[in-house]
């Protein structure tokens, strides 16, 4: 009985999660990086909370993007090196679904924890308590979209020299809409405005990403593995 | 004639704009031609090395 | 079938090389002639604008290079898709040839736009949707060229950059329609034909200049394409014959 794509995806997800939890210190690295970045701004800009509040959306989102990029490197690298990715591609199962599973794990381990711990950084940036839920929600949704987009560039740079820098360079232009709308949602949350419009747009980008990004990532990985 | 160059006071923007714009146009052409010349050179050299 | 023969010819590097060599000068001549006529029409014949006075004349360089920055990317993405789907080497070569041309057009768009923005809006740069997405287009071009340069195997480089070109194509409609979707400082599209917003004496030089730039793109693209083909097919016998 041949397993379907959903079962293959679930197996990949379980495997990735299990492997990730064997090295818990590696899990914390992107989170630590985010916290450090968020701390650098008060240290270098100003300690005044009222002024930091203006910069808070930018700091949070740039920090989230940078730590996401850091973690993306590991999305495919180890599996590509030890041949697991090749096995996935040759298995006759849907590579698209398997990569989608890997992307979801990446978000569960990076984007989601980052979003949930963002209030800690946000407090230090003068973000009011009433805004916290919206901040978390926006970063969670945007982080998911970022993981999806990042999977494409991670796949494209599999065979490239100095892939790390190139990966960031490729992800940035595609990530701009996510940053723009995400920061807008965060800004509106801080000033007490209506966050629905940018959140809907973030959601639309995420849906578009879910339908198209794994396909593109699978194409990219197949090219890189040839 | 002076009016033409002054461009009703906007001369300092209009002329550099055209300058940079058409300058880049010329640059693109020059780069294309030189890349073709280099490719031909390279091919000629290879031909000489393995006749 | 006649159509298939025609299509198949475009799959043959030596045939395309010959085609490019033969037609490039015609594109070039037509382009230069049209540009000169359009320049005369735009700089001298057209009357000054009611609001912008003579500053509006920047449109005759800004609008064409802006259009080309997007048109070249679209051409590149289509060529990349053709190369990916039908596995045509020539299509991949064409995509590679387009990239530097498009990148420079984007630089020209940003530069001429800044010189137009300063007198009109008071600022060289504003972070409005159209300018920002045009800047993103420049980053996309750099990413494309960087990816090509970063992958050693030429076929992998072709295919990977093709995927990138196609994924990035989503930016083109964003640039074009951003002025309609958002409140933007950048002016929305002006109707040129039919119920025109501008006087015909101002419109025809712009239309001619746009056509001239498309011809110019054909010209330089065909030159670059020949260089690409020579480099890619370096071991082929037709290359030896061409160069000897």
Image (tube, grey):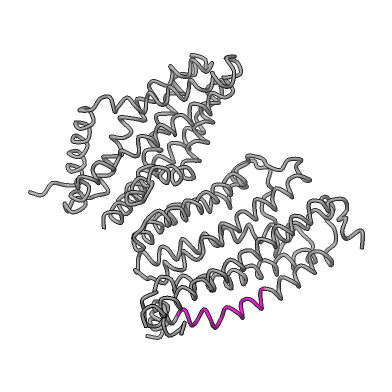
**Residue C7 shows in this picture:** no
The spot of residue B25 in percent (x, y) is: 65, 64
Q: Nearer the viewer, residue C21 or C47?
A: C21
Q: Quadrant of residue A55?
A: top right
Please, is residue B29 above or below residue B3 in the view?
Answer: below
**Residue C200 shows in this picture:** yes
Q: Is residue A204 left or right of residue C86?
A: right
Residue at 71% of width from left, 76% of height from top? C33
Specify whether residue C23 is painted magenta: yes
Q: Nearer the viewer, residue C37 or C240?
A: C240
Residue furthest to the front: B49
The spot of residue A164 in percent (x, y) is: 39, 42
Q: Is residue A78 left or right of residue C34?
A: left
Specify whether residue B18 is painted magenta: no
Q: Nearer the viewer, residue C50 or C152?
A: C152
Q: Is residue A77 left or right of residue C79?
A: left
Prevalent SS, magenta region: helix
Magenta span: C16-31
């Amino acid at each position: 009985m041949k397993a379907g794509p959903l079962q293959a995806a679930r197996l990949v997800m379980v495997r990735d999660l299990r492997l990730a939890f064997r090295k818990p210190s590696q899990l914390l690295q992107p989170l630590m990086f985010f916290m450090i970045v968020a701390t650098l701004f008060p240290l270098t800009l100003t300690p005044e909370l009222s002024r930091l509040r203006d910069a808070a959306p930018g700091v949070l989102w740039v920090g989230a993007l940078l730590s996401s990029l850091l973690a993306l490197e590991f999305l495919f690298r180890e599996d590509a090196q030890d041949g697991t990715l090749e096995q996935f591609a040759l298995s006759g199962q849907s590579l698209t679904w398997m990569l989608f599973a890997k992307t979801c794990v990446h978000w569960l381990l990076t984007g989601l924890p980052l979003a949930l711990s963002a209030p800690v950084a946000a407090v230090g940036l003068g973000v009011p308590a009433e805004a916290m839920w919206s901040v978390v929600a926006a970063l969670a949704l945007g982080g998911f979209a970022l993981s999806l987009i990042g999977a494409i560039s991670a796949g494209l740079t599999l065979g490239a020299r100095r892939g790390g820098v190139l990966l960031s360079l490729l992800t940035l232009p595609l990530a701009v809409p996510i940053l723009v709308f995400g920061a807008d949602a965060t800004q509106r949350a801080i000033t007490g405005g209506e966050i629905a419009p940018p959140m809907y747009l973030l959601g639309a980008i995420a849906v578009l990403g879910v339908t198209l990004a794994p396909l593109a990532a699978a194409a990219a990985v197949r090219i890189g593995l040839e | 004639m002076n009016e033409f160059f002054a461009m009703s006071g906007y001369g300092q923007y209009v002329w550099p704009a055209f300058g940079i714009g058409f300058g880049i146009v010329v640059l693109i052409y020059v780069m294309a031609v030189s890349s073709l010349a280099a490719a031909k050179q390279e091919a000629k050299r290879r031909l000489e090395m393995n006749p | 079938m006649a159509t298939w023969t025609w299509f198949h010819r475009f799959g043959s590097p030596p045939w395309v090389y010959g085609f490019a060599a033969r037609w490039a000068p015609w594109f070039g001549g037509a382009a230069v002639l049209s540009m000169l006529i359009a320049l005369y029409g735009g700089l001298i014949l057209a009357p000054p604008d009611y609001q912008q006075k003579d500053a509006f004349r920047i449109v005759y360089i800004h609008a064409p290079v802006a259009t080309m920055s997007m048109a070249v990317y679209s051409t590149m993405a289509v060529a990349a898709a053709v190369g990916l789907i039908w596995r045509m080497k020539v299509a991949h070569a064409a995509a590679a040839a387009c990239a530097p041309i498009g990148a420079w057009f984007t630089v020209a768009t940003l530069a001429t736009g800044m010189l137009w923005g300063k007198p009109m809006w008071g600022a060289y740069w504003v972070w409005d949707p159209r300018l920002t997405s045009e800047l993103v287009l420049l980053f996309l071009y750099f990413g494309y060229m960087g990816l090509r340069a970063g992958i050693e195997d030429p076929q992998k480089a072709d295919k990977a950059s093709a995927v990138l070109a196609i994924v990035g194509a989503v930016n083109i409609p964003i640039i074009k329609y951003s002025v309609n979707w958002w409140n933007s400082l950048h002016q929305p599209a002006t109707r040129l034909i039919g119920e025109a917003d501008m006087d015909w004496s101002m419109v025809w030089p712009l239309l001619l200049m746009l056509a001239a730039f498309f011809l110019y793109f054909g010209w330089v693209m065909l030159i670059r394409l020949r260089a690409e083909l020579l480099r890619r097919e370096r071991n082929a016998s037709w290359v030896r014959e061409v160069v000897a």
